[in-house]
Structures are given as structure tokens and as C-alpha cells.
Amino acid sequence: MAAAPDIGGFDTFDPRTGPVPANKYAGLGSALLHGDGAGTEVFTIVPSIKTLGGPKTDSTQIDTTTLDTAGGYETFVMGLLKPGTLSFELVWDPGHPIHLAMMTDFANRTLRHWQIQWPDSATTGGPTQFAFSAYVKSWEPKAAPNTDLTMTMELQISGPIVQSLIGGGS
């Protein structure tokens, strides 16, 4: 087997054109937006998010191994795609209308529209946006001396995650 070419710190290699750099972005400026569910839906930024993780997608693997499978390895086919979950930690303001709305969504089992906007507009013409529907699956407040009052929340995504560029991107 031939050795992989030295691509000098680049992330990928295109055999036709050579090394292809990948852009790097800071997470600062990422935003989670909560839809209000109205006919002409208005999305509001969820304020004071410290960390945003996900969406964490997955898939179902269907085991197709049989007694006569050649080679001694299990075999699989892809089943249904699982849209997964999104988790985030925020500095919690118990009286903030959006923070209250998310807790109400949990209590009422409300399927809500959400968006994530990523801060990559300098090179993509974006920003890149993920749009999806989700339930508030869980929430957990946390308090400790000499730290922010925080809350960790998890959304259960239902259906596809649609990726697009917004704000004039192509």
C-alpha cells in the first residue's frame, strides 16, 4: 500500500488539485434560536448560552450476519436515521421570557421549531443554519458558590435537520 501524501498541515487532499485547506472558526457567535409557533413564525435567540453541543445524530444498524456469512465478520445495512439530540448550557435567568418558554415547552410537551446559526459567514456567504423541530427533553439547573446560576438543557430532535446558508449565501 502506498503511503499517504504529506499534505503539510492541510486537512484533505484532492488528487486532481492537491492539498485542500479547511477553514477554521471560533464558536463565538454561534446562536440557538427558539421559534414562537405563530403562523408567521418569529425566532428569538436563546440568550446567555455558554456551550452548545450537537446535534448528535445516529443511525440504526441492522445486523444481517447469517450462519453462512463469508469471511468471519458481522455484516450490517443501514436502517432508519436518528436525528438525535442537542444539548446546551446557559447562564440561567429564571425570569427571562425565553428561558421560561423553554421550561413551559417541556411541561406541555410542545414540539417547537428551532434553528442553529454558525459563525462561518466570512467564507461561505452564510452563516450556515441548521433548522429542525424538537422537544425539550430535559433540563437541570445548577448552583454553586461563586459561579453563575446555570441550566443544562437537552432537545430531542424529531424529523430531519435541514442545513442551509442564510443572509445571501449560495
Image (tube, rainbow, N blue to C red):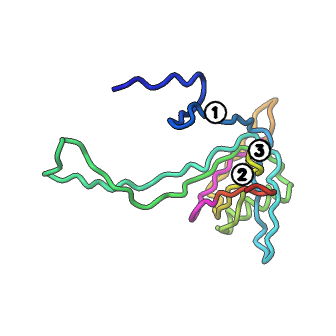
The quarter of the picture where residue 104 lies is bottom right
Q: Is residue 52 magenta?
A: no
The quarter of the picture where residue 143 lies is top right
Crowd tier of the residue under label 3, counting other residues whose Cα lies within 10 Å: few below 14, some 14–19, many 20 or above:
some
Inspect the image, locate mark 1, and give the three-letter code of the amino acid beneath it. Answer: Pro
Q: Which residue is mark 1?
A: 21
Q: Which residue is mark 2?
A: 128
Estimate the x, y position of residue 100 in percent, counting from the top left.
79, 59
Measured along the vertical axis of the image, is residue 83 above or below residue 152? below
Distance between the alpha carbons at the discs numbered 1 and 2: 19 Å
N-terminal of the pair, mark 1 or mark 3, is 1
Inspect the image, locate mark 2, and give the three-letter code of the amino acid beneath it. Answer: Thr
Estimate the x, y position of residue 48 in percent, counting from the top left.
82, 45
Q: Which residue is mark 3?
A: 119
N-terminal of the pair, mark 1 or mark 2, is 1
| Count of marks, rendered view | 3
Estimate the x, y position of residue 8 in percent, counting from the top left.
58, 22
Range of magenta residues:
150-162
Residue located at (67% from left, 62% from top): 106
Distance between the alpha carbons at the discs numbered 1 and 3: 18 Å
Q: Is residue 161 magenta?
A: yes
Residue located at (65% from left, 57% from top): 163
Estimate the x, y position of residue 14 in percent, counting from the top left.
53, 37
